Amino acid sequence: MNSDGEGEAVMDSAVEVETLKGAEIIVRALRDNGVGTIFGYPGGAVLPIYDVLFQQADIRHVLVRHEQGAGHAAEGYARSTGQVGVVLVTSGPGVTNMITPLQDALMDSVPIVCISGQVPTTLIGTDAFQECDTAGITRPCTKHNFVVTDVSHLAATIHDAFRIAISGRPGPVLVDVPKDFQLAIGPYADRPRTRLAAPPQPVCATDIKTAADLIINARKGIIYTGGGVINSGPEASALLRQLVAKTGFPITSTLMGLGAYPATGKAWLGMLGLHGTYEANMAMNQCDVMLCIGARFDDRVTGRVDRFSPHSRKIHIDIDSSSINKIVQADVKIRSDAAEAMRNLLQALDTRSQRLSPERVKDWWRQIETWRALNSLAYRPRKDEIMPQFALERLWAMIKDRNPYITTEVGQHQMWAAQYCGVYEPQRFIKSGGLGTMGFGLPAAIGVQVAHPDELVVDVAGDASIQMNIREIATAVQYRASVKVFILNNHHLGMVRQLQQHFHLNRKSHSYSAAMPDFVKLADAYGAHGIRCDHPDDLDDAIEEMISIDGPVVFDCRVTNLENCYPMIKPGAAHDQMWLNDIGETHLMSTEHTPAVL
């Protein structure tokens, strides 16, 4: 090493090999993998890395207020860009605070690389200060994790972490680096930028032909998509739109798949599942052929599995073979990247396009229109109180022309956002799906805003969920991330309270927040702008003010306290059994009941 600590080149068997400190290797590897932004929080076990970051200008570091915020910000960054989100945390509590975002990313297939510091190797196993078993703790909640045991392997390990995170079904990868290896000298092994996806899996021609035959012969077909279509990239969403047009089928989506097909499209049925539309769930139940692309038949979609779409032939396309036949048995199983499978399927259908006449699904669409006519998202407005549905309808009406990014926390507001914010492009609606993490939305919005500084980013929140990571407002202020936090404030844990009303004889056990912060004053304390609105007549002007402000905004929208989110499938019921209003179980909607008018 030279006197100023920079690496120097040495000759080894006629091959030039550059040697660097371990911390320098890490930063160089991040740069060589195309990383321009990382989210993190310093601590003793990663100070050598932070020292190197201080001396360079290629990688921007965003200092969050809690490691969980770093993880969710990296998720927002990754989900809105298609690139790997990167997190840097220290040992001990730094790692344990990352467990929730790692598990969140694992369940929602979000590519993240987390670099964690560890105590020096001489102290491992001694219960040293801020020591924990990082490998053991994070193994169940990562796609893969590494413990660096030799500085000569450090560069290759970082490169491998990026390759694993983005290839196949994306997910989080952790690299644990003891502090002494951050200071040790080792070789830097350069590699191509491995953040790009691996080549698509070849598709079985026989399976594609079988799937095409089922689609051509279907009279009541439906396309059901999930987050896998969005993860496959922009081409997949374009191919999906072609596939819908080619087949003439209606299309529905999971929460994670919203935006792959535009909500303005004529074939769009809305989200399906627990809080999905009546027409989406009924069409899924009554279809004769179901084409599932990049979704995994989770419990919030299927309801009772033994009564899920009982008369259909099912085609399942998924890049992860473990997701196929895990919950619902498929008749045609296609393990493939979504875009590659759809490209092949479209080619197969093109050769027999004369058999895809719109007439074959005319009766099916006539039936769907009768379900649509029920208007399952209808609600009763109130003259002097803001209904949460109305708040989101007005929000979307006033921002949709700007093609905004929407993030959400978790609760009733998340479902209302999915129902009333009609996103029409992929990577624009970002939420915690599989894990359902309260506190996700604000840090995720910051990650999105950092990636897209000139775009409108709105976090739809609840008064309870926003408080989980509200300290990240300080991060937004520091980095001039102009996120708009739109809080539906009903003074309750809304979804919990709704379940208590329906299934626990209305015993609202600890779901009411008797002490609530003044969100406007809290915004002011952080240096952000606060707005409050409690009357429907004032809502549009208040939203316009929120949009016009250049900087972070906290919008306290006081909504009616006890509104419930419908439609809703009763736990343990079939997916064609839905509550459409507060009347109760005697008005369950199903194929065995005549729908009541709201």
Image (spheres, rainbow, N blue to C red):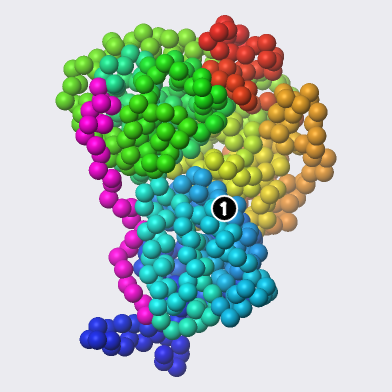
Against 317, is 282 above or below?
above
Q: Dividing the picture into quarters, in which one does residue 345 lie?
A: top left
Residue 238 lies in the magenta stretch: no
Q: Dividing the picture into quarters, in which one does residue 383 lie?
A: top right
Considering every residue shown, the one lying at the far left of the view is 351
Near-viewer residue (234 or 593) = 593
Question: Which residue has dot 1 on it?
Answer: 101
Against 34, is 300 above or below?
above
Q: Inspect this view and state whether residue 537 appears.
A: no
Is residue 341 rendered to the left or right of residue 507? Answer: left
The magenta segment is 187-213
Residue 198 lies in the magenta stretch: yes
Q: Position of residue 355 (x, y in %)?
A: 21, 16
Considering every residue shown, the one lying at the far bottom of the view is 3
Q: Inspect this view and state whether residue 596 appears.
A: yes
Q: How many marks?
A: 1
Circle 1: residue type: Pro
Near-viewer residue (84 or 552) = 84
- Give the residue displayed 45% in from the left and 29% down from the top: 328
Near-viewer residue (567 or 555) = 567
Against 571, is 235 above or below?
below
- Give the residue displayed 59% in from the left and 47% down from the top: 440
For numbered disc 1, what is the local secondary structure?
helix
Is residue 138 rendered to the left or right of residue 381? Answer: left
- Give the residue displayed 25% in from the left and 22% down from the top: 213
Q: Dividing the picture into quarters, in which one does residue 506 lie?
A: top right
Q: Position of residue 572 (x, y in %)?
A: 61, 24
Dot 1 surroundings within 10 Å: few (below 14), some, or many (20 or more)? many
Q: Position of residue 172 (x, y in %)?
A: 48, 55
Q: Position of residue 181 (x, y in %)?
A: 50, 79
